Amino acid sequence: MSLKLQLVKDGKIVFEIPLSPTEWPKDQLETELTAFEEDFKKFSSMFDALSNQTRLKMMRRLVQEENSTMNFADFMRDLDLNPKTVWENSKKLSDGGFLTKTGRGTYSCSEFSQSAFLTLSLALRRLLESLEEIENLRR
């Protein structure tokens, strides 16, 4: 069974990778793994930023906002957080590349940041579910 991950834009495949290491040409797999190791610090920062339930809730609220912008007080009120918690978690999200401080106490989330959040939180979850389902079918 050949399983591939595809990104499609306007019906055209813009990115495709096999999900089984046996389907990769050995030299290409080595190149990809080396590139991942070189980007490890960036990925680690992103995963670290999203490895907390409060930060996930903050990102969810930002993605739900029409202009992807919220202020400090909104986070406190909407998520029932204290100022220290908002500050610490907004710093972590900023360090991970998900939040930008756009003004005094105002934070925004770029389209890239929203896409990264959705990919890491939703698409990755669905991908893992599919891989687990395939593994269970093989047993």
Image (cartoon, grey):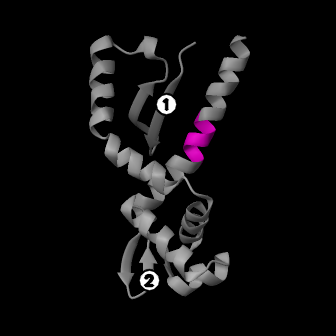
Type of residue at label 2?
Thr
Q: Residue at x 67, y 78 (%)?
A: 80
Type of residue at label 1?
Leu
Q: Residue at x 51, y 47 (%)?
A: 120
Q: Residue at x 63, y 77 (%)?
A: 81
Label total for image? 2
Q: Does 123 lie within the magenta span?
A: yes
**Segment tinted magenta in the rendering:** 122-127
Main SS of the magenta part reads helix
| Residue bearing mark 1 | 5
How many other residues sit within 10 Å of disc 1, few (<14), some (14-19) or many (≥20)?
Answer: few
Mark 1 falls on what kind of element? Answer: strand
Which quarter of the image is occupied by the N terminus? top right
| Residue bearing mark 2 | 106
Mark 2 falls on what kind of element? Answer: strand
Would residue 43 appear left or right of 52 to someone viewing this image?
left
Q: Nearer the viewer, residue 44 or 63?
A: 44
Marks 2 and 1 sit apart, C-alpha to C-alpha, by: 37 Å
Residue 47, above or below 31: below
Would residue 134 appear left or right of 22 to someone viewing this image?
right
